[in-house]
Image (cartoon, rainbow, N blue to C red):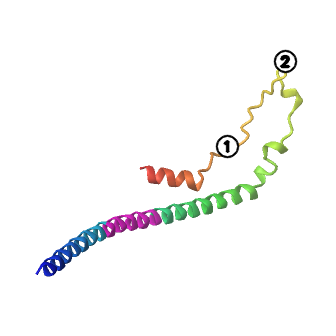
Amino acid sequence: MLEVERANQSKLELVAKIEVAEADLQTRKKFLDVALNHVEAANIGKLAVEEALRRWRAENAQKRRCIDNNAKFKNSYPGLQRRDPMMLDPSGLNLLIDDTCGLQHSLSNGEILSSKLGS
């Protein structure tokens, strides 16, 4: 009779351990689902950023080709311009305004993703 009680007690302990393990498994499944949803959202954001970057590059490449092909802008690069020595003030400073590059800093992929994920 004592052996039967011990067997039943052991069985109850095993059932309790199984219930705890099943609860732990359900919790881990929920965390996994949340993590997978975050990964999916990040991939969607990444694809959107990549598409925007492709469009931006295509637009700017077209603008760059138009500017490069325009005869008015031939040799307009800052390094190729000649300075007129007569355009110096008495202190030796150049009176010409040198706008070396009217281009804005382009954002890197990391900066774009950081701004998307931060907002």
Q: Which mark is residue 69?
A: none
Quadrant for the N terminus, please: bottom left
The residue furthest right is 85
What SS does tag 1 mark? loop
At a point 23% along the width and 75% down the height, the residue shown is 14
At a point 82% along the width and 43% down the height, the residue shown is 79
- Quadrant position of residue 55: bottom right
**Above or below, 75 relative to 18:** above
Query: Residue 82: x percent and y percent?
Result: 86, 39
Whether the residues at callouts 2 and 1 have beta carbons within 8 Å, the answer is: no
The residue furthest front is 2
- Quadrant position of residue 26: bottom left
Query: Residue 35: x percent and y percent?
Result: 39, 64
The range drawn in magenta is 28-44
What SS does tag 2 mark? loop
Nearer the N terminus, badge 2 or badge 1? Answer: 2
Q: Which residue is mark 1?
A: 102
Residue 77 appears left or right of 9: right
Give whichever of 72, 23 is nearer the camera. 23
Query: Residue 115: x percent and y percent?
Result: 48, 50
**Above or below, 10 relative to 114:** below
Amino acid bearing label 2: Pro
Give whichever of 115, 6 is nearer the camera. 6
Total numbered circles: 2
Amino acid bearing label 1: Gly
At a point 30% along the width and 71% down the height, the residue shown is 25
Q: Which mark is residue 90?
A: 2
